[in-house]
Structure formats: C-alpha cells, structure tokens
Amino acid sequence: MRLFEMLLFFSNACLLAILFLFHQRIRRSALLLASGAGSVFLVIHLLVEGYRVQLLFLYGFTILMPMLSLINVFLTPKAVRTASRIRRVLGRLFIGIGLTVTACFLYVFPVFDLPAPTGELKVGTQVFHFVDPSREETFGKPASGKRELMVQVWYPAQAGTGKYAPFIPDTRILRYMAANYGLPGFTLQHLKYVSSHAYSGAEVSSAQTSYPLILANPGFGSSRFLHTSQAENLASHGYIVAVIDHTYNTFATEFPDGRITTSTTNDLFSPDHDYRTESGNRDKLGNVLTDDVAFVLDQFELIQSGQIPSHLNGRIDLGHVGVFGHSIGGATAYDAAYDPRIAVGIDLDGALYRLRDREGLRKPFLFINSESEFERLKRVMDNHAYTEEELKRMGNTREWMEQVTEDKKVELERMRESADSGGQFLYIENSEHLNYTDVQFISPIFKMLGITGKIAPERANSVINAYMLDFFDMYLKNQGGNLMKGPDSRFPEVKFATSLL
C-alpha cells in the first residue's frame, strides 16, 4: 500500500470509529476534522500517486463525508438524532462493508515494489523493434507479413537521471494481461504505477569495455515484462540481457505503430493434440521460437558493429553469450543453445521439445525446476504409472500421458548429458511454475490459490537470481561457481537432483 493510499484509508477508518465511539457533542467537530484530513490526503494521492479503480469506495466516501459533516453542523439536535438512527442502521453498516472490501482489494491488488538488483552497477533499458525479412508470420489470424519482434534490453548503465522506467510501460496491454489470468480487464490497471529499477536510454557503464550477452525467453502467455527483476539483477552484475517478446505467444505485445497482438497458440497445449508431431502443434511453435532467438542474436551482431544505432554499439561481448527461459521459453533456451554462438543456458521449469531427432547438447546447462515439476520427473524416474483417477483429475487421457512420459524420459537423458558437460539439475522446495516470473509479485491471492508456491515471492526471486548469476558467472566470466558445487546452507530450499539422473 502506498503512503497516501494508506493515509486515505486510515482517515476513513477513523471516520467510521468516530461514528461508533464519540459522543454526539464532540462527534460533529471530530467528523469535520477527520473528513477534512481525508480530503487533503485524497487530493495529494490523486496528484502524486494516481487514481486506481480499487479505491472507488474510498474516493466516494471521502468526497461525501465533508458535505455530510457540514450539513451535520447546521442541523437541529432533533434532526441529528433522527439522522443518526438511520445511519446507525444503514450508513455505518454500508461504510464498514465498503472499507472491508476496499482493504481486501488493496491486499489482493497491491502496487508492489520489485526486488532491487543486488549488483553494484546501475541499470539502463532500451526497447528494439526487429523485423525478420526472411520469415513470414505464421501465427497471425490471418497470417500475413513478416515476423516482427519486440525485444527489451537491460544493461549496465552510468548513473541514471530522472525517474525509473515503469515496470510495464505499454499500459494498453494491461487489460489483456488481466484477461490472461481470468480477471476483468480493469483489475490490473494499477500496475502502471509499479516502477522498475532501470533508467530508459541511459549511457552504458564504463566499468568494462564490453559485457556478455544473455538472451531470455518468456513462457507461453507471458511477456518480457514478467522477467524484469531477473534481467535487472543480471544487468546490475555486468550483463546485457535481452528479453524477447515472442509475438503471438505473449498475452499481448504492443508495436511502435500501436498494433497489439495477442496469443494465438493456446490450442497447441491441449491434451487433444499430439504436441510432438510436425503439423500445427507445440513443436511448430518451438521451431518459430528457436528461430526468433537466432534472429535476435543476428541483430545484436548488427548492433555491435554499429549497423543498428544503439547505446550498445561496440559494448557487447559476443564471444560470451548465454540464454535462459521459463516454461516453453526454457525449452526454447535449450534448443537455441545448439547455436554455436551460444555457450551456456538455463531452463527455468520448462519441459523440452524437439529432442528425438537430435544429439545431446553437450554444453553446460542448468535446469532449475519447481517442486511439482521435479515430482513429475521423479515419477518417470521411478516408472510410477498414473492411475485412472489421477488422469481424470488432471484432465488428461492415458494415451496423452504415456506420450508425455516417453518424452520426459528423453528429457532426463538430455539432462544427464548436460550434467556430464558441467551443468546441474536443481529444484526449489515449495516453489510452483509461476514463482519463476514476476507474476508472483502481482497478487498474494496467487499463492492462496496454489498458482505460486508456499515459498515467499521475495525469497523465491532471491534464490533463483543467485543461482542464475552464479551459473552465468562461472561460464561467461570464469568466476564464481560456488553454488554449483553442492548444497549451500544459505539456500536450504535448493535441492540438487543430479544424482537422480
């Protein structure tokens, strides 16, 4: 809760307390004083912090109470007593319910603070619009034009000036984001007030002549914005991090000309589809996402050479390139790492694709899984078949689950090969799939519903960032690597599962 939101709420709570506790003789002046203070807080809140729909009751009550208080001053004692009886029955009940509901809204939809980066360097950010002239768009409805991507870069910066960039600068997409999580379109509009820790367009830090490049891939129905805290943290430790909005796989992407695209790939994840075949399915999507990474890397080669104008010209260490991703973005990271220009990668809780017809990666690769995904993999390790009741509860057919199980066995083999090449296989206790994105900060209700795990969002973020940084440092900077050696008392929730492979 922001400062003046809090003051506005408590001034209204005081009004309710005055109605219940104060004697009639001093109630008039107390109500007038408290309602006046609330009006001041309201004006400051609207000017400094900005309007949000979750506070509509507070706005109305704050505006109404000064008027009622002034009227109360001029009413006769008999009229006051009559009015008070009515308010006791209806008014106070309405106020109490309104304040309770408002408090719930403020808890469920907070204007939160993203975790601050832990590195010593300031962070800058820049957004690129890339068009691939060699590829036709296949996921648009109707499919037309060339493949276009929005890519946001976070990088080490000189001391920034002005305000931090907003967490989600493309505010028009917030209603699509809300719909993606089954919420009415207006419910997440307050996220436009959430700040990042990066300065738009800042100069690149002079601490080093160049910085390793890391390419990042959000999961299905996600967005580049939902990996802001991870990107900022890596940038503060001396990395250039480019997060790709994979068009038509995001909940929404806004382009410079105002066009907005949304996800058209939902049906690729249905149990009714054979998602490993080569027609209109998950692997088809995987091919496009992997090609996106290769194309974006091509563009950063052009940026490095100065053919694309940017603050980053000449500052990218293309000899040390990493990749990571979440969910299907993790699978994309693994698949993209076959590119000889990419040295190392991380998969955050993502199942793999395009495995059967390929040799092992044979590169250091880190798999960090949620506890739920680890349990699924362990079930495959133990050859534990699902019962009909379990399949019914999950909404899957036995044929589909058997296919997935076979794919998991291939994934486990790929994990073994990566471990033999210097990688690791970890899982984090009490974490769930969306703890690996900034979704976990949006609402505590996600934790109650089991969408995120029992682990505190701030703790999950801290643990994931620590292990990502250590792994990239080890292979892209030839330093660190201590966390990769085995269990660490600072992170008891991290479990090494490499021995099970």
Image (cartoon, helix red, strand yellow):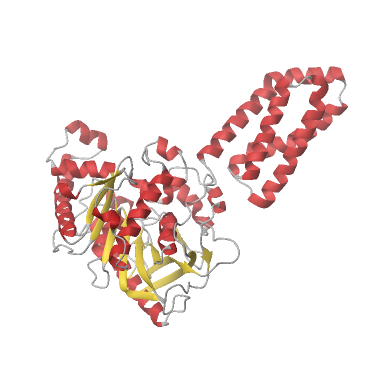
Q: On screen, 265 above or below 52?
A: below
Residue lying at the far left of the rendered structure: 383
Q: In this view, does 348 lie above or below 472?
A: above
Residue 17 in the image: state x and y as whole percent.
69, 25
The answer, for residue 355, to whether it is visible in the render is no
Residue situated in front as seen by the camera: 125 or 180: 125
How far across and how far down the image is residue 14, in percent? 69, 30
Which quadrant of the rendered structure holds the N terminus? top right
Judging depth in this view, the residue of 64 and 49 nearest the camera is 49
Left or right, residue 91 beside residue 309: right
In the rendered view, does 308 fall on the left or right side of 468? right
Q: Residue 227 in the image: x percent, y percent? A: 41, 56
Q: In this view, does 88 lie above or below 3?
A: above
- Residue in the image at 42% along x and 74% along y: 208
Kindly tell me whether residue 466 is visible in this rendering: yes
Residue at 86% x, 24% y is 75
Task: Report the side of 489 relative to 241 (left or right).
Answer: left
Report the side of 346 relative to 244 (left or right): left
**Across the whole image, how many numbered discs are drawn on residues?**
0
Q: Who's the residue at 40% across and 57% down the image?
A: 230
Q: Quadrant of residue 347?
A: bottom left
Q: Position of residue 232 (x, y in %)?
A: 44, 60
Q: In which quarter of the image is residue 161?
A: bottom right
